Amino acid sequence: MSDAALSAIPDHVPAALVRDFDFLQPVVEGDLYDWWARLHDGPEIFFTPRHGGHWVTTRAEDIGHVLENYEVFSSQQMTVPKGTHQFPSPPIMYDPPLHTDFRKLLAPFFTPKSIGDLEVKARDLSVQLIDKVAAKGECEFVSELSLAMPIGIFLGLVDLPDSDRLELLAYAEKMVRGKTHEEQAEGFMQSYQYLGAVFAQRRENPGKDILSYALGGTVEGGRPLTEMELLGMGALLLAGGLDTVAGMMGFIMLHLARNPAHQDLLASNPDLMPQAIEELMRRHQIANIARLVVKDTELKGVAMKAGDMVLTPTSMAGLDDRRYPDPMTVDFARADKRSLVFGKGPHQCIGAFLARTELKVFFAEWLKRVPRFSLAPGKQPVAVPGRANAVSYLPLVWEV
């Protein structure tokens, strides 16, 4: 039986709450976020028989509640069907207190001071990537820019050569966007093999990078990390940027290509960039991760049993009209742009400040160097749902 095949409905699930919904379907007709928003027409919490059977929360309040209440909704299973992700990914697949130990290991590399050094690299890399395409008058944004940026920043975090960028990008793409569990597993195994050699080198010649620091770190009262924990943490750092930064770059660029007035506004008012990025992230949230119910519970009158899986699509949280007035409209002056784009609670993304920095730097440099741009005539961009929403094809043109 394939993952998307229909599973039996558990006895505790009322028939009125069953809805056939597949968040991993490969093709969505029309605008991706219109597709997500249509889920608000049904039950606020429903059960789909796809991918082993799982609950789906559709409102910002409930999504936030599940994400922050790890004692009931655990991160030890973050994908559906349950048990399909067999690779350790500290810290995101651990709950406190072990999660806290791993997070402390990473924290020094994600402070504003540390990010200040990476901001210089982000700016240099942005300029380098943009200058390669600016004179051509066209580009396919995803392959030429949005996938290249986060891998380049990862290389800076771990002190690895830029010459390894394409190899690592291939591994990360399989881990994050592999169409089958086998392809995702292949990506993890390839990244483990690569990182295993790097850790062996750092044991002999440690540096000041995050991998060297992890080798000397301890958790659970003083034990060193196991080899699998080291490899899992390294793979998570590699894949993490693709989930949020690359995906968000694609959706922001797609929005700007369709809205020349916003291009002009940001080009002439660069000080607006931080608040514009917040609003664009609010509108185009990426992550659609799951949680495992570890205690029988009730959410908004819906009974959930230990062992159930719950999908928490942050895509839906940003489109909730109870949370945001006129949520589909991008309004840079919106008073409250706070969102769940980086999660909530103890598992909130540790790289949020870095991601914001990358996005602000890239789009500031793009708008300095590329005149008004648009979607290539006769070509259609492609945006797909999944564990992380993504723009997979984005052809752009401009005059030179």
Image (cartoon, rainbow, N blue to C red):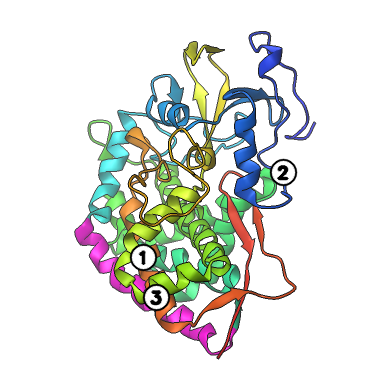
User: Image point 44% across, 74% down: which residue?
Assistant: 264
In this figure, which residue is indicated by the disc labeled 3?
267
Closest to the observer: 300 or 298?
300
Label 2 sits on a secondary structure element that is loop
The numbered mark, 3 or 1, whose residue comes first in the sequence reads 3
Q: Position of residue 25 (x, y in %)?
A: 72, 43
Left or right: 111 in relation to 350: left
Left or right: 231 in relation to 39: left
The amino acid beneath tag 2 is: Gln
User: Image point 43% across, 19% down: which residue?
Assistant: 72
Quarter of the image with the C terminus in it? bottom right
The amino acid beneath tag 3 is: Ala
* Residues tagged 3 and 1 counted as in contact (Cβ below 8 A): no
In this figure, which residue is indicated by the disc labeled 2?
25
Q: Estimate the spatial distance between the alpha carbons at disc 2 and disc 3, rounded to whole Å.
A: 37 Å
Q: Position of residue 93 (x, y in %)?
A: 44, 35
Instruction: Please tell me whether mark 2 or mark 3 is closer to you in this view.
Output: 3
User: Image point 40% across, 45% down: which residue?
Assistant: 342
In this figure, which residue is indicated by the disc labeled 1?
360
**Badge 2: residue crowd in 10 Å (few <14, some 14–19, many ≥20):** few
Q: Which residues are magenta?
A: 112-137
Quarter of the image with the N terminus in it? top right
Is 132 inside the magenta-drawn segment?
A: yes
**Badge 1: residue crowd in 10 Å (few <14, some 14–19, many ≥20):** many
Answer above or below: position of 232 versus 136: above
